[in-house]
Amino acid sequence: MRRSASILAAGLLLGVAAYICFYAAGTASHPAMSSGDVPETAWLKREFRLSDADFKRITELHAAYQPQCAEMCRRIDAKNAELEELLSKAATLTPEIELKLEEAGQLRVQCQKNMLRHFLEVSRSMPPEQGARYLAWVTEKTLLPDHKMHSQASVPESSHEHGPRQ
Amino acid sequence: MNTQPTHDPNPNSNPDDRLTRLLSDWRLETNLPPRFQEDVWKRIARAENAGAPSFLGQLWNVLDATFRRPVPAVAYVTVLVAIGLSVGMLRARETTSRLDHTLEARYLQSVDPYLQSR
């Protein structure tokens, strides 16, 4: 009787231990678990199989781009607020609104140029094949209009369910 | 219930013969209570049920008998370990996939001001 109870308990304990070990081993190497400051760039390293040297260069590029990006973000927020205020007051398309829309459009173009410049730099810092894959993925997700509508068709060879890995 | 057997006329006879005679002479002089027979059967049924093991008891008996042999015991432990490994691996894959989605979105937000300002 006691032997059977021991076997029953040992089976359950070993099963739970096996689950915990495999779960921990399967998730421990993930950038979100192992990386401290910038897990998204660590994800980039894993996703695009970057060497340490490539990753270091890309991390530097990323860090240098962040202030520009933040400044753009601030300007976009300010422009959106101005436009929102004008739209809340006007019942027709006034010259002020037209002007604000043009300014917002110019800001978008400037922002997209900055982004594309950064993306090209990053892609050049990767091995050619991974660089091309990165550029296709990141431009589709950020620059190309309505990217969600044809995202499935544009990355047909991806075996990775969520994104760019091939 | 009155039991009044007649006295044995011959005290030196065989005890079995005397018992037989006593039983044959035994007469019930009172009526049985109502539904006596039915009640007796019910009591028998209750006694039988009280003696039977429960479902868990039966299950435990089966397990106990099974684990007395080494092959089923080892197979049981092996199957549970295999289930633990498989489920752990699948859950780890799900978790890393979800984290990948999150980090991908975070990277895009970190490079696209329009995603940040939304």
Image: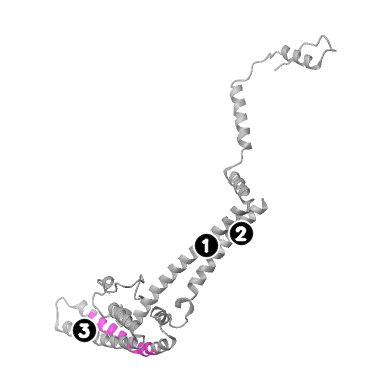
* Residue B18, quarter of picture: top right
Could you tell which of marks 2 and 3 lies nearer the N-terminus?
2
Residue that lies at the very extreme toward the right in this rendered image: B12
Chain where mark 2 sits = A
- The crowd level at tag 1 (other Cα within 10 Å; few <14, some 14-19, many 20+) is many
Residue assigned mark 3? A105
The stretch of residues the image draws in magenta is A60-83
Which mark is nearer the camera, 2 or 3? 2
Please tell me whether residue A68 belongs to the stretch shown in magenta. Answer: yes
Judging by the rendered image, the residue that carries numbered circle 2 is A10
Q: Amino acid at mark 3?
A: Gly
Give the numbered dot on residue B84.
1
Could you say which disc has been placed on residue A30 in the image?
Answer: none
Residue visible at 50% across and 74% down? Answer: A28
Answer yes or no: do the residues labelled 2 and 1 have beta carbons within 8 Å? Answer: no
Q: CA distance from mark 2 to mark 1?
A: 13 Å
- Find numbered disc 1 in the image and state the secondary structure of the residue it sits on: helix
**Which image quadrant: the C terminus of chain A?**
bottom left
Pointer 3 with pointer 1, Cβ within 8 A:
no
- Could you tell me if residue B4 is visible in this image? no
In the image, B113 versus A34, the foreground residue is A34
What type is the residue that disc 2 sits on? Ala
